[in-house]
Image (cartoon, grey):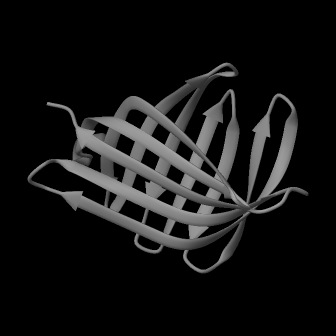
């Protein structure tokens, strides 16, 4: 498949993450811009996250049965989401590398062709090396830019 076969669109991305630890809930939201494309039936979303540590390029590859989150730059991360399965990954920052154990409870993707917008929702439990597990709900909303 050549690059000419790939249909690439500019998108506005809203990333919302809710984290529950016991009775406390934290919510984070990021609005950024990136691209959406398909390679075969696999959806790829790419965007840049920026914080005090620097810039991080994020790629999400969504297939029918699993989703992979890759981050590269100020933060390096690989996280695999596979329904009802515990998967290993890693998180690497200037402070070192941590092992991740992700148990995915829900993966849901929807696309509205009329509005040219989509949403990918991931519900999962995350164990980060030695820490108490947190319940995560990540929602990636994206809309094609005209």
Q: Is residue 62 visible?
A: yes
Report the quarter where the C terminus lies.
top left
Tell whether 112 sits left or right of 118. left
Residue 131 vertical position relative to residue 94 in the rendered view, above or below: below
Q: Farthest bottom residue?
A: 84
Farthest-out residue, front: 23
Camera-side residue: 23 or 68? 23
Image coords of residue 88 (percent x, y) = 74, 64
Q: Residue furthest right?
A: 130
> Is 9 displayed left or right of 20 in the figure?
left
Residue at the (87%, 37%) spot, across then down = 96
Q: Position of residue 102 (x, y in %)?
A: 69, 65
The number of numbered badges drawn on the structure is: 0
Residue 93 vs 45, above or below: the answer is: above
Left-right relation of 117 to 104: left
Q: In x, y percent, where is residue 20?
A: 65, 57
Residue at 30% of width from left, 41% of height from top? 3
Q: Position of residue 103 (x, y in %)?
A: 66, 71
Residue 2 in sight in this render: no
Q: Quadrant of residue 34?
A: top left
Report the residue at 49% width, 29% height from top.
48
Q: Is residue 62 above or below residue 2?
A: below
What residue do we see at 84% from left, 48% from top? 98
The answer to which quarter of the image holds residue 72 is top right
Q: Residue furthest left?
A: 114
């Amino acid at each position: 498949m050549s690059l000419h076969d790939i249909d690439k669109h500019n998108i506005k991305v809203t990333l919302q993450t809710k984290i529950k630890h016991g009775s406390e809930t934290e919510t984070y939201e990021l609005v950024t811009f990136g691209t959406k494309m398909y390679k075969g039936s696999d959806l790829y979303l790419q965007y840049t996250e920026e914080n005090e540590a620097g810039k991080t390029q994020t790629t999400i590859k969504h297939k029918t049965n699993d989703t992979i989150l890759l981050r590269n730059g100020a933060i390096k991360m690989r996280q695999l989401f596979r329904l009802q399965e515990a998967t290993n990954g890693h998180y690497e920052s200037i402070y070192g590398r941590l092992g991740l154990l992700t148990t995915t409870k829900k993966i849901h993707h929807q696309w509205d062709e009329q509005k040219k917008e989509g949403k990918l929702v991931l519900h999962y439990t995350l164990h980060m090396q030695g820490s108490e597990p947190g319940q995560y709900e990540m929602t990636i909303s994206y809309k094609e830019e005209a």
